Amino acid sequence: GNSGINIELRVIPTLANYTELDDIVEFVGRVFSNINQISLMGLESIGWARKNWSTIFIEYTSYSEKITSAIDAAHRSGIPLTIFNYPLCHLPERAWELAAQSISDWKNYYPKECDECTQKSSCAGYFSSSTGRFHQPPRPIL
């Protein structure tokens, strides 16, 4: 990681690693000089992830404090952090400015509850593959 090549580190929080989000960010900030972007990626319910959903998925709100701590660690390290594939209503408000509206149009979906949300136009929404039991219910921001 230190041979002059810029690296984007993508971290997908799961049951196996969500407690270490801030530690992961702090570690790479100290050890790798060529990390130029850290991306926290929401888990998409396709392929092996869908098959193993009950053993890997953790509700976003269960680790919102760890997301905030990871943001702080990235800031201290001077590494930009961006959050992809998360509905804003499941992120701490402090993380909203780092969240990208990142899900491709063809696989993006907003449940009807999102229609009344004031942040819908800025929100990534949900993966269409998550319809049904694979996503947390929306909590419209009013």
Image: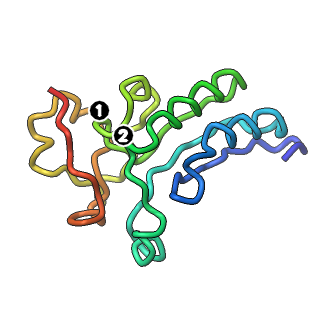
Determine the residue located farthest toward the right in the rendered image: 3
CA gap, disc 2 and disc 1: 6 Å
Q: Residues within 10 Å of mark 1 (few under 14, many from 20)?
A: some
In the image, residue 126 above or below residue 128: above
For disc 2, the marked residue is 101
In the image, residue 51 above or below residue 18: below
Query: Which percent across, then down, holds residue 26?
Result: 72, 34
Label 1 sits on a secondary structure element that is helix
Q: Which mark is residue 13?
A: none
Q: Amino acid at mark 2?
A: Gln
Query: Which percent across, then down, holds residue 42?
Result: 44, 51
Question: Who is closer to the viewer here, 1 or 27?
Answer: 27
Q: Does the residue at mark 2 contact the one at mark 1 (Cβ under 8 Å)?
A: yes
**Image quarter of residue 74:** top right
Q: Which mark is residue 122?
A: 1
In the image, residue 19 above or below residue 15: above
**What residue lies at 15% left-to-right and 51% top-to-bottom?**
111
Q: Earlier in the sequence, mark 2 or mark 1?
A: 2
Label 2 sits on a secondary structure element that is loop
Query: Which percent across, then down, holds residue 17?
Result: 59, 54
Q: Amino acid at mark 1?
A: Ser
Residue 51 vs residue 71: left or right? left
Question: Who is closer to the viewer here, 52 or 41?
Answer: 52
